[in-house]
Image: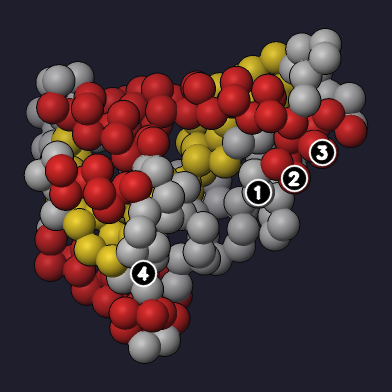
Amino acid sequence: MAAPLKIGFLASHSGSSMRAIIDAIRAGALDAQALLLASNNGDSAALTWAREHGLAARHISGRTEGSPQAADLAIAEAMTVAGVELLVLSGYLRPVGPVTLERYRGRILNIHPALLPKYGGQGMYGRHIHEAVLTHGDAETGATIHVVDGEYDHGPVVAQRRVPVLPGDTPETLAARVMAVEPDLFVETLRDIAARGAVLPSG
């Protein structure tokens, strides 16, 4: 029987996927332990939610540590000390630093609001993604969970969920429909990894 996943989180704002994952753990629907949240935003709703729900949480950023390089090292050290084995990005709007990338190589997951490899890369975030989908006249879009490497939205795809593009969609309505499937997709993906003891793809 596979051991429970030992999960840490990085979030910048609401941390909606983190919340769904922790709710699933506490409901007995996911065999995992939520160990630590680090946020680069000291005012983030994710930090407030985590502290209110008994999850260890820290504000770690270039501001708190003195530089982005020091923040990267502090995140890697904090996750290691907490016993984190799998790192989940839940709306984390900063590049993961090289120390954290190396320490958790192949064990960092991110969710992107498009069907990668389409509409990924630098500058492809938020409204820009959904505008691009509509401009190109795509019939569907969706969400992708992928392994994080040193390039934006580049690592191996782990799971995807497709979402139709409907007549009359705007970037806002499309974003809302994609966002609605993201938390369940993350929970289901982690459940599958936990149940199978699966090794994440490395390339």
Position of residue 16 in the picture relative to residue 59 (left or right): right
Q: Secondary structure at mark 1?
A: loop
- Disc 4 from disc 1: Cα separation: 22 Å
Taking 158 as reference, is 120 above or below it? below
User: Label 2 amino acid?
Assistant: His
Residue at the bottom extreme?
Answer: 66
Q: Secondary structure at mark 4?
A: helix
Taking 64 as reference, is 101 above or below it? above
Q: Position of residue 196 (x, y in %)?
A: 26, 28
Kindly identify which residue carries mark 4.
100
- Disc 3 from disc 2: Cα separation: 6 Å
Q: Earlier in the sequence, mark 1 or mark 3?
A: 1
Label number found at residue 169 = none
Position of residue 129 in the picture relative to residue 202 (left or right): right
Q: Quadrant of residue 70?
A: bottom left
Kindly identify which residue carries mark 3.
132
Q: Secondary structure at mark 2?
A: helix
Label number found at residue 128 = 2
User: Label 1 amino acid?
Assistant: Tyr
- Disc 4 from disc 3: Cα separation: 31 Å
Which residue lies at the image location 65% right of the left edge and 35% below the top edge? 114
Label number found at residue 125 = 1
Q: Earlier in the sequence, mark 4 or mark 3?
A: 4
- Disc 2 from disc 4: Cα separation: 27 Å
